[in-house]
Amino acid sequence: MKKQIIALALLAGSFVAAGAQVYLDPKAPIEERVKDALSRMTTHEKVRILYAQSKFSSPGVPRLGIRQLNMADGPHGVREEIEWNSWSAAKWNNDSIVAFPSLTCLAASWNRDLSRAYGNAVSEEFAFRGKDIMLGPGTTIARMPLNGRSFEYMGEDPYLAGEMAVPYIQAAQANGVACCLKHFFLNNQEVDRFGVNVNVSERAVNEIYLPAFEKAVRQGGLWTIMGSYNKWLGEWCCENDSLLNGILKRRWGFDGAVVSDWGGTHTTMGAALGGLDIEMGTDTDGKTKDKSKGYNTYKLADAFERLINEGKIPMSVLDDKAARVLRTIFRTSMNAGKVIGSQCSEAHYDVCRQIGEEGIVLLQNRGGALPIDVSRCGRILVVGDNAVRNMSEGGGSSELKTKFDISPLNGLRRVYGDRVDFARGYYAGRARYGSADKLSPDSLARLRAEALDKAKSADIIIFIGGMNKNFRQDCENNDREDYNLSYGQNELIADLARVQKNIVVVTFGGNPYAMPWAQAVRAIVHCWYLGSMSGEALAGVLSGAVNPSGKLPVTFAARQADYPCFQYGREGYPGVDMQVYYNEGIFVGYRWFDTKGVRPRFPFGHGLSYTTFKYGKPVLSATSMTAGDSLTLTVPVTNTGKRAGKEVVQLYIGDEKTSVERPAKELKGFEKVALEPGETKTVSFTIIADDLSFYCEKTHGWVAEPGVFRAYVCASETDVRGTAVFELK
C-alpha cells in the first residue's frame, strides 16, 4: 500500500509539472500553446494528428496529454452516434436530440438574431455530446433547383447566405464548438459530385460563389472548413492549391484547419501541398490487422511521413498543418471555456419553434383564406403524406434521431381538436439510395379515392405535401429527377380543388417546385423543414397565433426551363464527360430573372403577412460619395393593418451605366423590423463603395466605377417600394 501511495504521489507530481508547460496552460495565448506543443512533438506525432482514427475523430498526442478531436454531422442537430469504425448506428439510448429547422428555413427568416440563437442552441447539444467540430453550416449557393442538398444551404444570394451564416458561426464557436463550413466550394449538384470539374468564370467565382465563405472567414472567425468533392481548375477541391492556399489561407488569412469531405482526398502530393490539414475517410476498417485497409494508408499518413523524412516535402509544410490542427484542438477540446452544454432542453425546443415560425413563407393568400379562425373554421380535412411523416429522417448525413417530433397533423389537432379529419391521399414510402417500400397501385388508388370522397364534406382542405428526404428528393448523393412534385401530388391537388375550392396547400422541402395548380387553390404556404416542432410552428401560422414573416431565399420559377442553368443543355447541368459549365456566369437566381426579364412564379425575397406595411420615401444622407465615403439611407415603415407583424425591408442597388454587363440590381442590405398595429419605425442602411463594385477579370480585382447608382427599397426583389439615386465620384 505504501508503495502505491508513493507511486501516486510521483504521478501527481509529474502531472503538476506537466501542467506548468505552456501548451497545457488554458490561460496562455493560443499561439504560444501551439508553438510550445510543436516544439515537443516528434515528426510522427505531427503527422498522426492530420488524419482520422475513426469515422468521426482524429487523434491528439496521448504522450503529451493533447486531446483528440471529435466530430459529428450537422448542421441541423447532432447526428446519432455511429460505431467507431463502421457506418452502422451505435444504438445508444442517450443520443436522441432536437432537430432544428433546415438552413433554408433559417435563411427564410432573414433574422440575424435567430441565426445567433440557432448557433448557440445547436452547439450546446454538440458540446453536451462531447463533440468538438460541427460539420456545418453550409453556404453553397443554390444555383440549380434540383440539388439534393439545397435544404442544408442558405439560398441563392451570397449576401444573404453570408449575413445569416456569420451569427450562427460566432455563437457556436463562442461555446467552444468549431463550425466546419461546407462545402468549399462549387458543390452545386449531387449528381457526379465525386468527380465533376466545374468550369466557371473568374468573375462568377468572386461575385457569386466565394463571398459567403469569405464573410464567414473574415467576419465570422471560422475555425474549420470542409473541402468539397468536385474539381475546380481540374484539381480536386480538397487538394486545390489555388483555392485552399491561394484564396483561403493567403488572401483571406484563414488560420484554421481545412478538413476533407469524407473520402475526398486522392493523392498524397496534392493533399500535402494543396492546403489540406485533416483527412477524413469512409471505407477504412481500423479494426483489421490488414494494413492495406488501415488509417495509415491515408494520403496524409505513412506516405506523407516518408516524403517528409526523405526531404521531398519541407518540414515547414508539416509544421503549418500540425499548427492548424493544434490551434483547433486548443480552441475546442482543450478550451477551458468550452460549455458543458445541454440536450433537448426547453430552451432549445423554443428556439426550434421560433425559427420555424419565422422561416415559414406565406406565398399566396387569396381572399384571406388564412388564417383559419379556430372559432369559425368548420370541418377541416388534412390530406397528405407529409402531415404524418417524420421529416427528420432521411436526407443522408444530416439525418437526425430525435427525442420527439410534433407532426403537422398532431400540431393542427392540438389547435382545432376533433374538427380535423385526415386522409393520406398519397404515399411516399421510405426510399434510401435506391431501395423503397411501395404500395400497390390498388392501395394508392384507395388512398386517393378516400381523400376525394372526404373532400366533399369538408369546409376547408389543408393539403400537406411537397418534398421529403427520400432518395431523389432532398437527399445527399442524388438530385431530384425534375421540377415537379412527386408521388402524383400535382394531379391530386388539382382533383381536390375541383371538389372543394377552399383549399390551402402546405409544402415542405428545400427547393422550389412547379405549381400548375396555383390558380386553383386559395393559399400556398412553404415550410422548408421545420424540425422537431414542425406541427406547433405550422399550426401557429395557419391559425393566426403567429403572423408569418418569412421571405424566400430562392426564386420560385414557373417552369424548370426558366432557370439559367437549364438554358445550356447538358453542359449547364449535369455536365458532359464530367465537365459542367456555368455559362450563365454571375446571373444566378434572381439576377437572371430580373435582368433577363423572366417572370418568376414567386420572386426572391417574397413573403406575405396577415397585416400590411406601408413604406415611406427613402432618404439619402447625401446625393454623392467618393470611394472612401459612405451614405446612409433611411426609410420609414408603418404597420397599417390590425395585427402585430414583422417585415423584412430589403435594399438592392443597381448601376445605371456600366462598362460590363451587371445585374439590374443586387441585394446589399436587409433588416427585419417588428411593428405593432399603427406603429412606424425608421430602417437605416449604410452604403459603401464595396456595395457598388464588380469583379474585373482584366485587373483581377474589384472595381467601383464612378457614375450614377440607384438604391431600391423593396418588400421583395420585384416589389419595389421606393428608390433613391446617388452618384459615385
Image (spheres, rainbow, N blue to C red):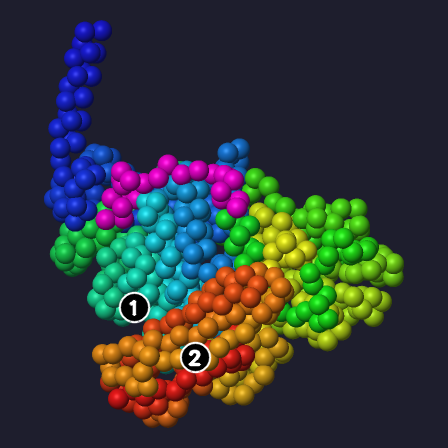
Is 349 covered by the magenta stretch? yes
Q: State the residue in front, 83 or 171.
A: 171
Q: State the residue in front, 214 or 353.
A: 353
Q: Nearer the viewer, mark 1 or mark 2?
A: 2
Q: CA distance from mark 1 to mark 2?
A: 41 Å
Q: State the residue in front, 436 or 75.
A: 75
Q: Extreme top residue here?
A: 1
Q: Quadrant of the N terminus?
A: top left
What amino acid does circle 1 point to?
A: Leu
Q: Residues within 10 Å of mark 1 (few under 14, many from 20)?
A: many
Residue 623 visible in the shown view: yes
* Residue 358 pos. (x, y %): 54, 58
Q: Quadrant of residue 432?
A: bottom right
| Disc 2 target residue | 618
Residue at figure coordinates x 76%, y 46% from the top left: 417
Q: Which residues are magenta?
A: 327-350
Residue at figure coordinates x 22%, y 34% from the top left: 65
For label 2, the SS is loop
* Residue 700 pos. (x, y %): 26, 81
Q: Extreme front residue here?
A: 678
Against 377, residue 592 (above or below) is below
What amino acid does circle 2 point to?
A: Pro
Which disc is residue 243 wearing? 1
Against 565, residue 86 (above or below) is above
